[in-house]
Amino acid sequence: MHTQTASAGRLVLAYSGGLDTSVAIRWLAEQKGYDVIACAIDVGQAQPGEMDRIRQRALDCGAVEAIVIDARDEFADHFVAHAIRSNALYMGKYPLVSALSRPLITNHLIATARTHDAVAIGHGCTGKGNDQVRFEVTAMALAPDITVEAPIREWGLSREASI
């Protein structure tokens, strides 16, 4: 693999604190030349203190900056409440909570990219699920000028191989 030395600009990465996005920070920096800003968006999934640990993990993995956004109230008020009222269930029994969060997360990534003069956003979705579509379609609709990177999909690695 070729390692770039010149900066390709800033990239705001949707950062979960998990293995894939942690590895993606260094890869995006070393292989694509980005200055990676990790952006962890709390929509209610975190335990107390967990977002602080996630932020530190991003910095430890090489992010030039790590941002935590508390979007719990926004998610509950503007997404979950409407889904409950409309009985939004997948196959009639699974709440669409994860799917509903992707446009909100993408919106925050774009807003963060704008405030940090970033040229790209990134996510840690594989090429197998619909989350990649939710992130990328939202990004194309809201910010067609911003590049979307999907390093995990680009690698084509299984989780076992990445470990």
Image (cartoon, rainbow, N blue to C red):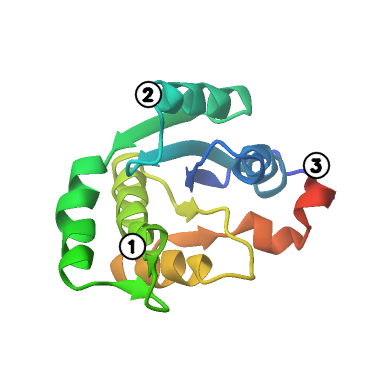
| Percent of width and height locating residue 40 | 42, 38
Earlier sequence position, callout 1 versus callout 2: 2
Q: What element carries label 3?
A: loop
Q: Is residue 141 above or below residue 17?
A: below
Foreground: disc 2 or disc 3: 2
Separation of marks 2 and 3 at Cα, in angstroms: 27 Å
Separation of marks 3 and 1 at Cα, in angstroms: 29 Å
* Residue 67, quarter of the rendered image: top left
* Residue 21, quarter of the rendered image: top right
Residue appearing at x 49%, y 65% in the figure: 131
Q: Residue 48 carries which label?
A: 2
Separation of marks 1 and 2 at Cα, in angstroms: 22 Å
| Percent of width and height locating residue 106 | 36, 56
Kindly give the residue lying farthest to the front in the view shown. 93
| Pointer 3 residue | 163
| Percent of width and height locating residue 14 | 47, 47
Q: Is mark 2 on a helix, strand or loop?
A: loop
Q: Can I make out residue 2 in this image? A: no
For the residue carrying disc 1, how many other residues have a C-alpha within 10 Å: few (<14), some (14-19), or many (20+)? some
Q: Can I make out residue 89 in this image? A: yes
| Pointer 1 residue | 100
Earlier sequence position, callout 3 versus callout 1: 1
Residue appearing at x 24%, y 51% in the figure: 75
Q: Which amino acid does label 3 sit on?
A: Ile
